[in-house]
Amino acid sequence: MTIADAIQKLIPKPQETLDRFSGNQEFLEMFLKKFPEDDTVGAVRASCKTEDWQKILADVHTLKGTSGNFGFEALFNACSVVVTAIRAEDYAAAKAGLPGVLSELDNVCDTLAKVE
């Protein structure tokens, strides 16, 4: 899979994402390739195995920001559900939303891992 294929699959509005990277395609591609190795990815996976809601909030909120900057809308939306639920102290809804975050995170990381 090429990086262009990954961008097409993961980023519904690629031009908006490119604009956030000052129009520098190489810069964007470099950061996309590094995303699966980001500390936040591991932190989210680890904290979602707990019920430490403040840690989950911090990690998922960070992932929400990162995914928003990259234009990973599905991941951003899944994170938003969990962040909103935790802030409302609706931990049942937050817990119900965690599989969506992890699934979307896996989708992004698996897709980017296939880039040659």
Image: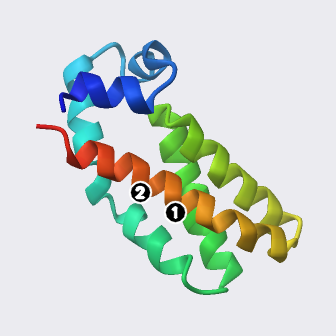
Secondary structure of the residue carrying tag 1 is: helix
Residue at 43% in and 33% down? 10
Q: What residue type is disc 1 on?
A: Leu
Q: Which mark is residue 102?
A: 1
Q: CA distance from mark 2 to mark 1?
A: 6 Å
View extreme (left): residue: 116
* Residue 58 x %, y %: 60, 67
Q: What residue type is disc 2 on?
A: Asp
Position above or below: 71 against 37 = above
- Nearest to the observer: residue 2 or residue 77: 2
* Residue 75 x %, y %: 55, 46
In the displayed structure image, the side of residue 113 where residue 89 appears, left or right? right
Residue at 34% in and 52% down? 109
In the displayed structure image, the side of residue 59 where residue 81 appears, left or right? right
* Residue 30 x %, y %: 20, 35
Badges 2 and 1: C-beta atoms under 8 Å apart?
Answer: yes
Q: Which residue is mark 2?
A: 106
* Residue 44 x %, y %: 49, 69
Mark 1 surroundings within 10 Å by alpha-carbon count, few (fewer than 14), some (14 through 19), many (20 or more):
some
Residue at 65% in and 85% down? 52
Res. 90 image quadrant = bottom right
Secondary structure of the residue carrying tag 2 is: helix
